[in-house]
Amino acid sequence: MNPIIKKFSIRAAILLAGWIILYFLIIIPDGRINNFLTERVIDGTVIGLNSLGYDSKGENAIVYIDDQASVLVADGCNGLELFALYIGFLIAFPGRVLYKALFIPIGAVLIFVVNVLREIALALNYKFFPDSFELNHKYTYVLIVYTFIFLIWRYWLNRYSLIANNQQQNEA
């Protein structure tokens, strides 16, 4: 097995185990991180919908458009697990710490924005095309978000990872 992949696999397994313990034993029971992030996603969704000209508000984890409930932002939809997945991959994959330190916050902000855009799209989807909401919620928008994260990873891998550094040295 390639030593880079082996190192990545070991680090990823350790990080995954640590995340599972942290998430289920501390984050979920405490609730503050999920509540904070859910509120920020709702705020962003409401701001986005209002800027598009819709009368929207957030109340009790539900986004309303014209006083009609349109989307529930549950803990599983607030992006925390997406952040953990994205950050865990960058930490686990061998590469320079400086580039990881730059890419982690930039990527987290971009993922947050994409997730808010996803919630805006879901709210509008429910308002105008409620029959397709479940399909789009479970598949379409999830595929878009994960594809976006994959593209950020790929960019980092090709430019700043240990693999990219090795390829640049071999080409020189």
Image (tube, rainbow, N blue to C red):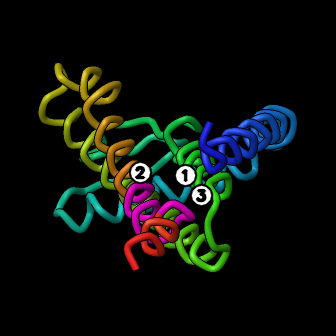
Proximity of marks 1 and 3: CB atoms separated by less than 8 Å: yes
Q: Where is residue 29 in the image (x, y as percent from the top left)?
A: 83, 36
* Amino acid of disc 1: Tyr
Taking 134 as reference, is 25 left or right? right
Circle 2 Cα neighbour tier, 10 Å, few/some/many (<14 / 14–19 / ≥20): many
Mark before the other along the chain sequence, 1 or 2 = 1
Q: Name the residue under label 2.
A: 149
Circle 1 Cα neighbour tier, 10 Å, few/some/many (<14 / 14–19 / ≥20): many
Q: Give the camera-side residue of 8 and 150.
A: 8
Residue 52, image quadrant: bottom left
Proximity of marks 1 and 2: CB atoms separated by less than 8 Å: yes
Q: Name the residue under label 1.
A: 86
Marks 2/3: CA–CA distance: 11 Å
Residue 45 visible in the displayed image: no
Q: Mark 3 points at which residue?
A: 90
Mark before the other along the chain sequence, 2 or 3 = 3
Proximity of marks 2 and 3: CB atoms separated by less than 8 Å: no
Residue drawn at the location 51% of the way across and 71% of the way down:
165
Circle 3 Cα neighbour tier, 10 Å, few/some/many (<14 / 14–19 / ≥20): many
Q: In this view, does 171 lie above or below 94?
A: below
* Amino acid of disc 3: Leu
Dominant secondary structure of the residues highlighted in magenta in the image: helix
Q: What stretch is highlighted in magenta?
A: 152-163
Marks 1/2: CA–CA distance: 7 Å
Residue 61 visible in the displayed image: yes
Residue drawn at the location 44% of the way across and 51% of the way down:
58
Marks 1/3: CA–CA distance: 7 Å
Q: Give the camera-side residue of 114 and 60.
A: 114
* Amino acid of disc 2: Ile
Q: Where is residue 44 in the image (x, y as percent from the top left)?
A: 41, 62
Q: In this view, does 106 lie above or below 152?
A: below
Find numbered disc 3 in the image and state the secondary structure of the residue it sits on.
Answer: helix
